[in-house]
Image (cartoon, rainbow, N blue to C red):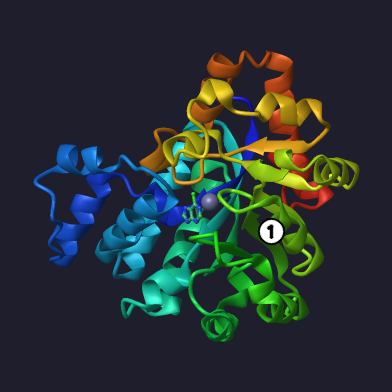
Amino acid sequence: MHLPKAELHLHIEGTLEPELAFALAARNGVHLPYADTEALRTAYLFDDLQTFLDLYYALMAVLRTEDDFADLADAYLARAAAQGVRHAEIFFDPQAHTARGVAIGTVVEGLGRALERSEEKHGVSTQLIMCFLRDLSAESALETLEAAKPHLHRISAVGLDSAEVGHPPAKFREVYAAAEALGLRKVAHAGEEGPPAYIREALDVLGVERIDHGLRCMEDPELVKRLAADRVPLTLCPLSNVRLRAIDTLEEHPLRAMMDAGLLCTVNSDDPAYFGGYVGDTFHAVHEALGLEREQLRTLARNSFEAAFLDHDEERRAR
Ligand code: ES4
Ligand code: ZN
């Protein structure tokens, strides 16, 4: 599906394909407890968010140098370009790397090197969104923002990800206020596995401009009305929802009902190496499973540019 589109919900660490994981493991002398890429791909089957996150964090052991992060991002951008992505706002998880002794500068400068060549090499403009791991402390998030200060010229926004339930947005009130004061934009994962109340809190307490996932808003009709009236973008990830068992089958995904309710929906790939498809594959899958018409797919593509952190000129160039 080659409609020009923006990808707004993509974890760069979730683009680590088994082949690249083994190549980086060899380059860095890291042992992977899998016989080969096939065995690793078999492990990419999950019961829920936590079983996915356990593997996702374990495999990051192969990412050690600036070159590793640059190669990871460049491989994603090449695949994204081939599927019609013209603009990508890319999440990364600094704490998942600093916790293993990899400096935040290694991560940001490595990613930055691939991103700054992306327009010329792949025809994809980019921004970087630094996510805080919500299952770690609020103090750790504040330390991370502090450590990122020398690299803020490369970072557009902050986000919030990892295990949701039990870690409500309000835990991160202070670091979001500090990020805003530094001129960063704000998004947060909410309503993936967590309740609709977390979506309200992300809006009211953190002041986010977009909700990542937001799937469970559908349990709260008043919230749906508010999100629609305020045109709050939702960055939905249908293949992720199926793989992590938020829903049983793609055919049951509420995307169509969400669009019909007037929500500003976008579709995205989340962790494409793990969830069975990049964003073009995702457009194709919702077309097949939900019978979305060409016009609705066009609306989703148009929404992705409206929801992106692009100014008017940039938006016109990307479309
Ligand atoms: C994630 Cl699917 C998902 N949810 C929450 N945190 C994440 N980090 C990477 N993928
Ligand atoms: Zn996500």
Q: Quadrant of the C terminus?
A: top right
* Point 49% across, 60% down: residue: 163
* Point 56% across, 31% down: residue: 84
Locate residue 215: give its quadrant. Answer: top right
Image label count: 1
* Point 55% across, 86% down: residue: 139
Residue 11 visible in image: yes
Locate residue 42: give its quadrant. Answer: top left
Percent x, y of residue 213: 62, 46
Which residue occupies the foreground of this view, 246 or 311? Answer: 246
* Point 66% across, 29% down: residue: 255
Locate residue 72: give its quadrant. Answer: bottom left
Residue 116 visible in image: no
Looking at the image, the residue that sits furthest to the right is 229
Decide: is 253 above or below 308: above
Percent x, y of residue 298: 71, 23
Decide: is 168 above or below 1: below
Kind of residue indicated by mark 1: Tyr
Looking at the image, the residue that sits furthest to the left is 35
Decide: is 230 above or below 38: below
Which residue occupies the foreground of this view, 231 or 260? Answer: 260
Q: Is residue 158 left or right of residue 303?
A: left
Q: Is residue 24 left or right of residue 48?
A: left
Q: Is residue 281 left or right of residue 188?
A: left
Mark 1, residue position: 198
Is the CB of mark 1 within 8 Å of ligand 1?
no
Q: Quadrant of the N terminus?
A: top right
Quick one: label 1, few (<14), some, or many (20+) residues within 10 Å? many
Which residue occupies the foreground of this view, 9 or 151? Answer: 9
Query: Mark 1: which secondary structure?
Result: helix
Percent x, y of residue 245: 46, 38
